[in-house]
Amino acid sequence: MKNILIIGSGAAGLSLALEVADHAKVTILSKNTLDCCNTIYAQGGISAVLGEDDSLESHVADTIGAGAGLCNKEIVEFTIAQGPERIAWLIEQGMPFTRIKQGNYHLTREGGHSHRRVIHADDATGKAMITTLTTKVKAHPNIQILEYHIIIDLITGTKIGLSTSRCLGAYVLNLNTNKIQALPASFVILATGGAGKAYLYTSNPDIATGDGIAMAWRAGCRVENMEFIQFHPTCLYHPKAKSFLISEAVRGEGGKLLLPDGSPFMQNFDSRGELAPRDIVARAIDHEMKRLGCDYVLLDISYKSEKFIIEHFPNIYHRCKSLGYDMVNQPIPVVPAAHYTCGGVITDKNGHTDVEGLYAIGEVASTGLHGANRMASNSLLECLVFSHTASLDILSKLTTAPKSAKLPSWDESRVTNSDEEVVVSHNWDELRRFMWDYVGIVRTSKRLQRAKSRVDLLQNEIYEYYSNFRVSNDLIELRNLTLVADLIIRSAQQRHESRGLHYTLDYPNKNPVAQNTILIP
């Protein structure tokens, strides 16, 4: 049987594994435990046209509207048409979506959507999804799971002196033993998620360090639209509530955004108020916080009944209560935080990258679905659709794909153990702070140039460090994250307009023609 290597254990990676495992040997690599991924933090749900009053055309129009002119219409239509079928597949796997009393599935509405079309499992859809898929993956005899393993780099033919540029596998660091091995594969799939940890404040877990984007770039893949980093408008403001997201569905069910004095403000920015797309809401909050010099704004749904709040948002309610906030009786403090990487490695609808044998699916990829701003709950839909199309493409090529090649061992002959680990932690902290200050929700050309100067210095330091010392988990992640930060800055510098998630004071207007920002290695 041919070997398939899947890097990442979120919704995209696990879904693809289940779809190909009957026909090939599959290895899933996770930097932490199998269930440690961005998906598990997804609260809201999955958008798909399931209601009788909804339509594919409406979902397409909403997605393209949120994407501010940069969505690929063909990809949007293709993805949304697949939605009901992929939801049915997930239900077949055992996904426990929330039902209403009549037995139908409950649909909620989120920002940017004109209809209720977000199917969910209470307010912890991602957790239910990962639990469902993990159970199936662990039970499959053809799937090998390697937890606490991190990829150092992809191996292509050209890197090891062969005539082919095909991706042949990867060098992997076992974090339990600190041993490095070469893992060969006939197909390699990047399902590594985004790069939220490039920013000081983020809803993402610590593993979201842009590894797949960085590795693909070093392997020769183009990336696009990296300037479009989505900031989720509402993360809980609390020193102990690291990364805790307050779902968009709270606003979808009537939650109001208020200034610290209790007055509403969203109507001053958009006629849709709290249900405007995320880029508009995040910018509005950022504007008011800077105008007033306050640390947060308030989100209030306390005018709803206790029964309604606890039934609709049980996990959010209990988490807030444990931190001293009672959603039933008071508004809760929220701030924007880096949430989603809308750009990424350029792929087609089958998940192909520019390198033969290498696929990218999920947040790591740029499919054309999200454009300049992702609409709420389209991300899990994208994971399901493109893991499916990539699996079909891989299965169609299994018989003709080359067998796994014998790969050279990792060379550690010229490196030593580091006695300066503090350099890594200092560089990491500096990177996240200047990205937040200079490449955040509102940008200027001067801020971007400051960020570029600093990231250039960091990359030089990290290159020297990487060349002389043995690799570690922190060094690998910092190397990747710094490269991705550089790609974000370079992309932002090239866009001389404000569009979607990229807003610059120097170019506040939108150009008449929308163009993708494409960077070539």
Image (cartoon, rainbow, N blue to C red):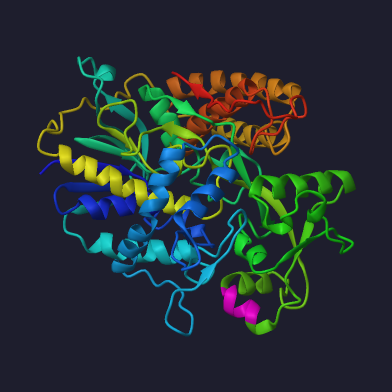
In x, y percent, where is residue 387?
Answer: 32, 48
Corner quadrant of residue 182? top left
Q: Check if residue 22 falls in the magenta segment.
A: no
Q: Quadrant of the N terminus?
A: top left
Coordinates of residue 52 in the picture (x, y in percent) = 46, 68
Pick whichever, 357 or 501, lies toward us.
501
Q: Is residue 216 left or right of residue 293?
A: left
Residue 13, image x and y in percent? 34, 49
**Horizontal relation, residue 393 to residue 323: left or right:** left
Specify the quadrant of the image occupied by residue 84. bottom left
Q: Looking at the image, which residue is at 67% across and 60% down? A: 240
Q: Is residue 291 above or below residue 319?
A: above
- Determine the residue positioned at 64% across, 80% down: 308
Of 236 and 491, nearer the camera is 491
Judge whether residue 53 can be spotted in this image.
Answer: yes
The magenta-colored residue range is 308-314
Q: Is residue 246 above or below residue 208?
A: below
Count of numbered circles on the image = 0
Find residue 38 and report its horizontal and vertical position in percent. Answer: 48, 52
Q: Between residue 178 and residue 21, name the one nearer to us.
A: 21
Residue sitting at x 33%, y 64%: 88
Quarter of the image for residue 253 reads bottom right
Main SS type for the magenta part? helix
Q: Nearer the viewer, residue 434 or 370?
A: 370
- Image height of 28 relative to 441, above or below: below
Side of 381 where 160 appears, left or right: left
Q: Quadrant of the C terminus?
A: top left
